[in-house]
Amino acid sequence: MDLLNWLTEPLQYGFLTRALIVTVAAAVVSAVLSCWLILMGWSLMGDAVSHAVLPGVALAYIVGIPFSIGAFVFGAGAVALIGVVRSTTKLKPDTVIGVVFTALFAAGLAIVSSTPSQIDLLHILFGNVLGVTDGELWQVLILGAVTLAVVLFKRRDLTLLAFDRTHAHVIGLNTKFLSALLLGLLALSVVVGLQAVGIILVVAMLITPGATAFLLTRSFDRMLVLAVGITVAASLAGIYASYYLDISTGAAVVLAQSLVFTVVYLVARPNGVLWQRLRVRRSRRRSPSAHVGDAPAGAVS
Amino acid sequence: MSTLSAAPPALRATNLTVSYNDVRALDGVGVSVETGSICGLVGVNGSGKSTLFKALMGLLVPAAGTVELYGRTSREARQRGLVAYVPQAEDVDWDFPVSVADVVGMGRYGLMGPSRRASAVDRAAVDAALERVGLAGLRRRQIGELSGGQRKRAFVARSIAQDAKLLLLDEPFAGVDRSSEATLTVLLKELRDEGRSVLMSTHDLAGVSQLCDSAVLLHNRVLARGRPSDVLTPSNLALAFGGALEIREP
Ligand SMILES: Nc1ncnc2c1ncn2[C@@H]1O[C@H](COP(=O)(O)OP(=O)(O)OP(=O)(O)O)[C@@H](O)[C@H]1O
Ligand SMILES: [Mg+2]
């Protein structure tokens, strides 16, 4: 079987199997989180957290502790810092987010550049999924499983928080705790995802699957399932593309997700742009103003 | 009889004062709603109606004043599920991927376990609430796929599923046509007759005299309160609305 060969050939290499597992695991966790993030309007928060973990990752390498600890501490720290600055000034949220994450990212770059021999900056920024060790694989799997378990257990509260925070408050739920929980889970999923695609692109995995699924359905449960399905397919496609076309794995995975988004944006019914165009054309052809030529009804006089 | 009169009112707020930076939104506002009655909160845009709701729900901390709901603090009342809120239409994300039944089900969350998994009792309560507001046939619709009046009824159904005793409704009649308004009016009267209490803000003066047992005229402070016919006098309305007002006849 040629196709079977084509599919199994990359898996002979242990590093590629590990890359596949890490990418799919990270992508699934991020995709699930993305459904809430895009509904909360927190997409930019994902970008901020992912950049802000750089100093944490760098320090973890220098001190010799697992990278995920450093990354999580700085990711959660950035979230807290953004919260404090927001609640004590009248600056708009995107401004505060921008100030905080660029500051932390710059601090990370400074740390990395002052210890050039120890850390491969490119690997942190763009991921090094082909070089994942067994230890890192386990970090990803365990953190991913914990994140997924918590988010799925609390999914109804998180959906309520995103939909109607006031109602959540009025029936006695702790909305501050729920917000903090979602931000903590965001930080965790960034930690998981940056191993796969790196700091710069992890935010794509935290936005695009949810955004794509949102275009396809008006039910939240279906959105979750679609986001996961899309992201798994895109991850597999990305890994194989990266192997056979010899392109960066992280880039290939994100490109595959973007491709799915583009197709859905254009053709998904009933909201796809192409269908809308078609419908406008058809209704124009049917309407009486068509006799006057192509001019829209209002332009006749 | 004496035990009845000793029972605290559904809502009693005294001397509520709230400022946003240098805008004083509420100035020494006192409101009370008797158990089993409907109170209309009337005032122009910016008169502090939504702010009053927020203070009652504990969403903002007043600079001064007290809030008591059924003789309890706002926090205690909330934790017992006594209070329900029907938001102003502008405050809802109508594109959110939830169905009508999902929204009504959210009324039950305070009564469920930590994962909010619906039991048979919860599902029955949601079905009954949907039936009651006449939305059973539309339960699978996405919430934004309802008309203005149906949307309001969906949120009232959520309070019914919650079995809340005090309903706070911010502008329930805004963007609602005459026939939906009539349906909603009947529904609110039924809820009152069951012993529930309602505080609703509105611009619809004709509706207030038809529906409400009492009224409060608000303009950052209380201009008048009492029976609707005593409150909505031309001179009071001129005070509240600055004369630029047309009273819509019923
Ligand atoms: N978040 C806020 N920050 C600053 N000022 C505010 C805020 N919310 C309301 N205000 C001001 O407080 C006053 C009362 O506003 P509020 O929203 O309570 O009025 P309202 O009676 O609900 O008006 P509407 O009929 O338009 O809903 C207004 O002057 C408003 O500009
Ligand atoms: Mg208002």
Image (tube, coloured by chain):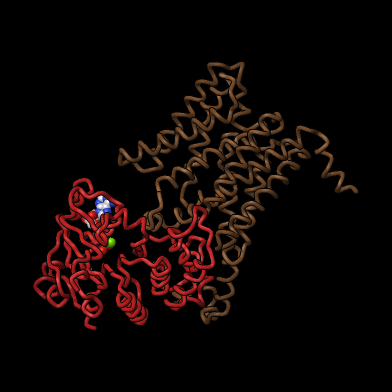
Chain colours: A brown, B red
Image point 16% across, 62% down: which residue? B219
| A132 relative to B27 in the view: left or right | right
Q: Nearer the viewer, residue B110 or A271?
A: B110
Q: Is residue A115 above or below residue A97?
A: above
Q: Is residue A56 left or right of residue A134?
A: left
Residues A112 and B168: in front is B168
Q: What percent of the width, then of the height, locates residue B107? A: 43, 63
Quadrant of ligand 2 in image:
bottom left
x and y, in percent, of residue B8 in the image = 22, 64
Q: Quadrant of the C terminus of chain B?
A: bottom left
Residue A147 place in picture, x, y as percent: 57, 43
Q: Residue furthest right?
A: A1
Q: What residue appears at the point 49 percent right and 55 percent down from the top-left corner?
A: B113
The answer to whether one can see residue B89 in this image is: yes
Q: Is residue B71 above or below residue A116?
A: below
Q: Residue at x 51, y 33 (%)?
A: A51
Q: Position of residue B105 (x, y in %)?
A: 48, 65
Q: Nearer the viewer, residue B184 or B239?
A: B184
* Residue furthest out toward the left: B235
Residue B239 versus residue A59: which sits nearer the camera?
A59
In this view, A36 is above or below B157 = above
The answer to whether one can see residue A299 in this image is no
- How many marks can you see? 0
